[in-house]
Image (tube, grey):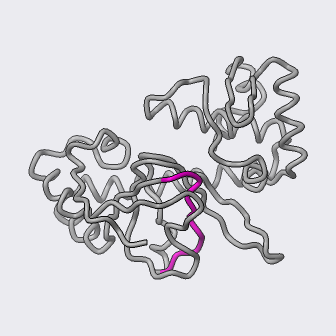
Amino acid sequence: MNPQTIKVACSSCNLRELCMPMGLNSGELDMIDEMVGVRRKVKRGAALFRNGETFTSLFAIRTGFFKTSIASEDGRDQVTGFQMAGEVIGLDGIVNDHHTCDAVALEDAEVCVMPFADIEALSREVSALQHHIHKIMSREIVREHGVMLLLGSMRAEERLAAFLLNLVQRLHARGFSQSELILRMTREEIGSYLGLKLETVSRTFSKFVEDGIVEVKQRHVRILETEALRRIVNPQALL
């Protein structure tokens, strides 16, 4: 899908504080506005990029949800992450100039295209931008360590509790409720990410409902006892 020719203005974007460094002066913001190319719309089920594609840009998610995944040896998709508005996607391509996963929209989405060559050039002039990119990369490394811990040592209840707490924390940072969320991903995709079978995910959701911790109506989840979820999982292991 070709990018739309809509110019982006980071300086007037309500997500700027999430995906761009804070404390920039007006001149530096103008430079970043020039760096960001266009917005690109991605339909639900369509790929923003595919494994093996040449890496040219990072993408700041403006609206919508994405999942990243890699194909396992037996041909199944292994979900490696879920990304939402205000987050930057595409960092996997920096290593060898090719993307190493698929990024697929879970709902109609829109991204801001940030050519990486321009980011590198501007980082030499705006140190805050370079520091911010390093922070994003570091956060991704920490998240991957959290996933490894979760998959290596946690029971199903701990994995799902950590997932729900992380998701609602990230949504709250974007102005959404601290206790209600709509799951944009399927339970099968959640299971793929958490290393659990679909039946286990469904059974664990049912247990949380029976224990009065959450209410679930299809994809709508209301967290009734946040502290109960926290007691289930070690807070240091949140994704």
Examine the structure image and report whether residue 100 is included in the region drawn in magenta.
Answer: yes
Give coordinates of residue 82: x percent, y percent.
Answer: 59, 52
The residue positioned 82% from the left and 47% from the top of the image is: 153
Q: What is the quadrant of the N terminus in the image? A: bottom left
User: In this image, 9 relative to 160: left or right?
Assistant: left
Give coordinates of residue 2: x percent, y percent.
Answer: 38, 72
Which quarter of the figure has residue 59? bottom left
Give coordinates of residue 194: x percent, y percent.
Answer: 76, 50
User: In this image, 46 relative to 150: left or right?
Assistant: left
Q: Main secondary structure of the magenta part?
A: loop
Give coordinates of residue 62: x percent, y percent.
Answer: 39, 49
Start-end of magenta stretch: 98-108
Give whichever of 211, 121 is nearer the camera.
211
Give whichever of 20, 212 is nearer the camera.
212
Q: What is the quadrant of the C terminus in the image? A: top right
Residue 30 higher or lower than 173, as above or below? below
The residue positioned 21% from the left and 65% from the top of the image is: 122
The residue positioned 68% from the left and 40% from the top of the image is: 163
The residue positioned 58% from the left and 76% from the top of the image is: 51
Examine the structure image and report whether residue 235 is included in the region drawn in magenta.
Answer: no
Residue 56 higher or lower than 124, as above or below? below
Residue 101 higher or lower than 180, as above or below? below
Tally of numbered tags: 0
Which quarter of the figure has residue 221? top right
